[in-house]
Image (cartoon, rainbow, N blue to C red):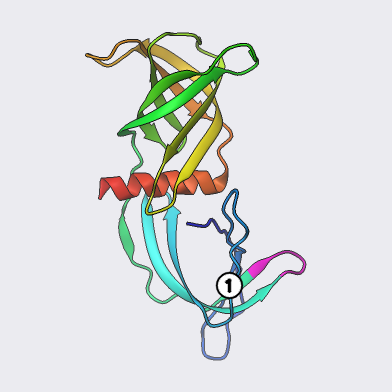
Amino acid sequence: MYASRVIGFSAVRRNGERSLLVTQPVMQGVAPLELAHGETVEFGALRGRGVFGFACTVDATSHEPFSYVVLSGPGAIPRLHAAKFARMPTRLAALDSIEGQPSASPQLGRVSDIKPYGMSLTVPVPSAHTGDRLRVSFRFSPDVIDVEIDTSALVRHVDAAESGDAGIAYGLECETLEPSQRIALKSFMAEHRC
């Protein structure tokens, strides 16, 4: 899944259609997606609380003054489902360490719920306080792509772990997610809510 952003629309043509202009699709750690004239591209658009799907045909590509793609105007754009993005329960293994303490070894924890801008991280031994920043790393697989997240997260609150779990739970706000990572995370959540 590659990330792209709508940058504009063309003027209305004689047939009443408009072209859609988007940035060249990219994914962190992977070369930009090269598209060819006439190729069909499927989009999943995340906007507010809705997830929409549509397809377009590549009309042209350009690398000047930056890389972008000119697409045919989309036909009908159906809403696939509402995406509320409340916290979603998960059980993802994670490593965390306090930023700014190079001597501290990473601790194994569990992402027990997640949303695109934050998570609850359960750890066996508390080492951070409200206001500290943690380095958090975890992996997940939306569709067939393996996504690795390595981000800085602000500790918003420290609570007792859920009943039955040992340790404590940090309420974290993710501060440095790449746009492609946030889209992959939203896709993962939407996929598991359906």
User: Helix or strand or loop: what does disc 1 sit on?
Assistant: loop
Q: Main secondary structure of the magenta part?
A: loop
Residue under the point 60% across and 49% down = 29
Question: Residue 73 or 133: which is nearer the viewer?
Answer: 133
Q: Against 160, is 85 above or below?
A: below
Above/below status of 93 relative to 39:
above
Q: Quadrant of residue 132?
A: top right
The answer to whether residue 171 is left or right of residue 150 is left
Q: Residue at horizontal 43%, vertical 54%?
A: 46
> Could you say which quadrant of the image residue 58 lies in?
bottom right
Percent x, y of residue 51: 37, 56
Against 151, residue 194 (above or below) is below
Point out the stretch of residues depicted in magenta. Answer: 63-68
Q: Mark 1 belongs to which amino acid?
A: Leu
- Tell me where residue 112 appears, x and y as whole percent: 33, 27
> Is 94 in front, or is 179?
94
Q: Residue furthest right?
A: 65
Pointer 1 local density, CA inside 10 Å: few below 14, some 14–19, many at least 20: some
| 165 left or right of 100 in image | left
98 horizontally vs 90: left or right: right
Q: Which residue is mark 1?
A: 35
